[in-house]
Amino acid sequence: MNEYQFKPEIAILYGVNEAIFLHSLSFWLAKNRSNSINFHDGRYWSYDTYKAIAERFPFWTVRQVERIISNCKEQGAILVGNYNEDKTDRTKWYTLAGEAEDIYFPKTVECIPPNGEMPVPQGIEADTVRDKPIPPNGEMQFTEAGDPFHQTVDCIKGTVTNQLSNTPHKPPKGGQRKGSGLSDKARAMLNEYVAGDRELTEAMVALMEIRELSPKAKNTDRAVKMLLAELDELSGGDREAKLKIIKQSVLNGWAGVFPLKGGTAAPLKRKEVRHVE
């Protein structure tokens, strides 16, 4: 059963469905920030269609996605813009705002324009602005948010199953979670491997979160390198096969990768199959 993360404090402010959407949005904003892309009017943005979002969250219909995003907009949790080069393209762009932005990306300095008024940047729908001060230079100062694989275990504040029930992760025996264990080199290897592929990135992040919570799995540079090599070998380098293999592990709670035998297959124990932990 797949799991979806969110922050309880965000759910209290905006609702559970909204919190799930905002958590996913924050992930892509952090990724875009680390890659210095999709930066407009002093903010980093992520764009998507209702249909694409509904496909990633199968428990939502397109209409529900539209309503969730509308709720986030009305409550001041997001700004909505249009920075498409093709002006006929109506794909919406989103970024965090208000308390949601403060929670996910705490600013090091609160800046208020000299005239005390907040300009509405070009491309942003005016009615999405909720008195959020923008610095005179138009740039927001953030603390370190990192890349998609930056301290992933610390991002887990809550989970939701496809029935939308709030179920906290269970820590390993002993009551304590492991530290991240991911070095800069390991994160760089993972980021290079997923190469900006959204689905592959989300699946890999989920797998690394399982490994972080596993008392046996190791996330040393060598272990990560072996994990990726094993994934290449099992998939034959095919992107779709990689995605299915990773999802198989995530859905079964496995910390390693194994040959595709369907979502309920047990890991093979033959000597020629390496189980990387």
Image (tube, grey):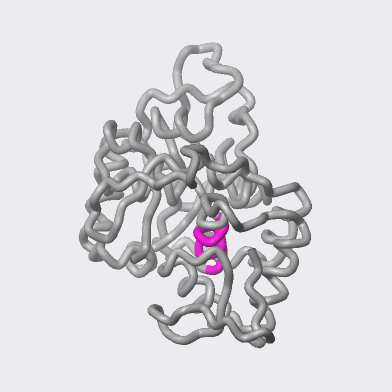
Judging depth in this view, the residue of 36 and 228 nearest the camera is 228
* Residue 226 x/y as whole percent: 73, 69
Task: Give the residue drawn at x 68%, y 51%.
Answer: 35
Q: Examine the rendering and report whether any part of residue 222 can be seen.
A: yes
Q: Is residue 80 magenta?
A: no
Residue 93: x percent and y percent? 45, 52
Left or right: 63, with 86 as reference point: left
Name which residue lies at 48% across and 35% down: 104
Figure check: 21 above or below 256: above
Report the number of numbered marks: 0
In which quadrant of the rendered image does the N terminus lie?
bottom left
Provide residue 37's location: percent of width, then percent of height: 64, 51
* Above or below for 151 versus 190: above
Nearer-the-camera pick, 62 or 79: 62
Indicate left or right for 165 with 227 as reference. Answer: left
**Overall secondary structure of the magenta section:** helix
Decide whether residue 205 is among the magenta residues. Answer: yes
Residue 111, quarter of the rendered image: top right
Q: Where is residue 228 in the image (x, y as percent from the top left)?
A: 69, 70
Q: In this orientation, does residue 81 appear?
A: no
Q: Quadrant of residue 58?
A: bottom left
Q: Looking at this view, is 65 or 175 the one in front?
A: 175
Residue 250 shown left or right of residue 239 in the figure: left
Q: Which quadrant holds the C terminus?
A: bottom right
The vertical placement of 184 against 272, above or below, is above
Could you tell me which residue is drawn at 52 percent across and 25 percent down?
A: 134
Q: Is residue 27 left or right of residue 169?
A: right
Q: What stretch is highlighted in magenta?
A: 200-208
Residue name at image x 57 percent, y 22 percent: 135
